[in-house]
Amino acid sequence: MKYIKSIFILILLFSCNKNFLEKTDKTQLTDAIQWASEGNADIFLNDIYGSLPNYWNQPENLDNFTDDNDAGFYYTSNNWKQGIVAASGTDYTVWGGITGSGDLTNWPAIFTAVRKCNTFMAEVEANAANFSPEWKQKRLDEVRFLRTFFYSELWMHLGGLPLITNLPNRSDSNGLYYPRSTFAETVNFITSNLDTILLNGHLAVKYNHGEADAGRATLGAALALKSWVQLYAASPAYNAAQPAAGPDPLAGYNNFDAQRWADAAATLKQFLDLYGNGHPYGLFSDLSALWYEANEYNAEVVWDRQVVPTTMGSSFEQYGGPVWINGAYYTWGNYDPTQELVDQFQMANGKSIQDPASGYDPQHPYVGREPRFYNWIVYDGAPYKMAWMDKQDTIYTRIDKVHPSKNQIDFGTDDVSNTGYYFKKRLNPLVRPGGGTISGANFIYYRYAEILLGYAEAQNESAGPDASVYDAMHQVRARAGLPDLPAALSKDDMRTAIHQERRIELCFENKRFYDIIRWKTAENVLNLDRHGMKITNSVPADNSGVWVYEVVPLNHPHVFLQKMYLNPIPQDVMDRNPRIRQNPGY
């Protein structure tokens, strides 16, 4: 985190007097010294911020676990998609392997961070005389937000959690071993903590690029997180008489209540009214450049993790994008869009490719598509030029016996895409892949477009497709260069349009996994094989024929079982705490 890291360094250098620096063994810091000043206490807080996951630095992200991406067979996502996930004793990420998207699905890591938050809050209260009221109020709400964020991430994967707000009393087993609270109790805990932050009003609404506190929690982040938790909890997988994972109060509400959709819509509307339309949050004009380092903290960024090149940098560019660029090997090719995702991108006229009036030609499938397709998807024949490249390349994935390409689809076990596609969304154009953690582009957890899409969904489910639903959808579509939706859509048709828009707009941002889980559609889309695009010439000997585009199955079996709507509690956790109960089906 750029500015928080700078604060950390400055504190180490200047927070204490010269005699302290000369005479004190910094390896023997005591509690009295740690909480003696605001600067010293900030060192502890910066360590908590450092626990935020840097999702850039993982060879797999949650999109690999969905129907949008086809990763290599040797990755954890491939194991998970076989339905073999189990509550093993040592695999805290419980994905069925060791390379999965595990930062915030890791039980010990989360509760270590929660304990740090509780320690900070207790010590600041106990040493309140050492701090100004303004500093204390702000920092306590920052930590209250961080603790809530950590809880929310684990809750989405596991359901009800032990709700720990105090430091453990090791002399009392009841105070040391917490049982899991119900799904509903966990939701209420998260939202009530966020309500406290919002009511207090001690945090800034937003920080901008270059400000010293950029990267710290804000009121905008708190309201966005509350709205997402409410939207998630109101969804069919949990807001039902029988939750998707099974009839258990740890797994959902065990009843349906339409008011949950209305509550989510109200919170999202509150964000739009208080902070939206550019005051200070809004849609960034250039969607293709939203994630560029130079555009950090633009109006669309609601909550992110700061990244510093090399010292706290990103290696995201190593893992995705075209494998071979201008004849040289650069990336692992982990992020390969499936044909199912590619087919979701609309035509420039805003019509689905399935619409006979769209103008889509299956033998010229990459002609006339919407701008986001060209900004984010690398297809056969796509021009490819990043700022670090000395010349433009053209990426060919076709099977060409006359002019073979190293990116040619081969359905093999190497890094080359088996789908016929790569992605370029969120890649830092300044960073040459393979250089290590050298990118400084921040990771965005929540952005304003998601607020608009979340409102459209919650309001449509609660009240139907009224004018406000259309307005939210049209803002996202207009920025994407698409025309408005047709008038007078039914509630079901609007739901379909919203789901499609989310899938396109938020693709490869770790959102699709949570959507197919909460919509209770994972059992449909993840029990089917995925597809790629095989392109061959009708006269392969000399390419004198026509290029034929054939959608082909990937032959990568997928299995999704009912229990997989939630991950298991790691067996090691249950062995250590006899009051923890397992999720249904495990």
Image (tube, rainbow, N blue to C red):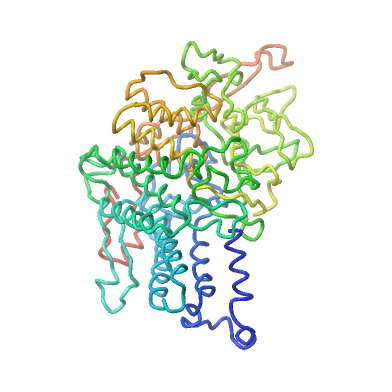
Above or below, 251 against 488 in this view is below
Provide residue 440's location: percent of width, then percent of height.
Answer: 64, 52
Q: Is residue 359 left or right of residue 461?
A: right
Q: Residue at x 78, y 35 (%)?
A: 391
Quarter where residue 168 is shown: bottom left
Relative to the observer, which residue lies in front, 464 or 432?
464
Quarter where residue 418 is shown: top right
Above or below, 86 against 240 in this view is below
Quarter of the image with the N terminus in it: bottom right
Q: Does the image show residue 92?
A: no
Q: Is residue 8 left or right of residue 357?
A: right
Provide residue 36's location: percent of width, then percent of height.
Answer: 49, 80
Numbered label tally: 0
Q: Does the image show residue 245?
A: yes
Q: Residue at x 26, y 42 (%)?
A: 243
Q: Residue lying at the far right in this picture: please name it.
A: 390
Provide residue 200's location: percent of width, then percent of height.
Answer: 37, 59
Quarter where residue 403 is shown: top right
Relative to the observer, which residue lies in front, 111 or 9?
9
Provide residue 172's location: percent of width, then percent of height.
Answer: 26, 76
Relative to the observer, which residue lies in front, 558 or 322?
322
Above or below, 307 against 341 in this view is below
Q: Residue at x 27, y 72 (%)?
A: 175
Above or below, 236 against 172 in this view is above
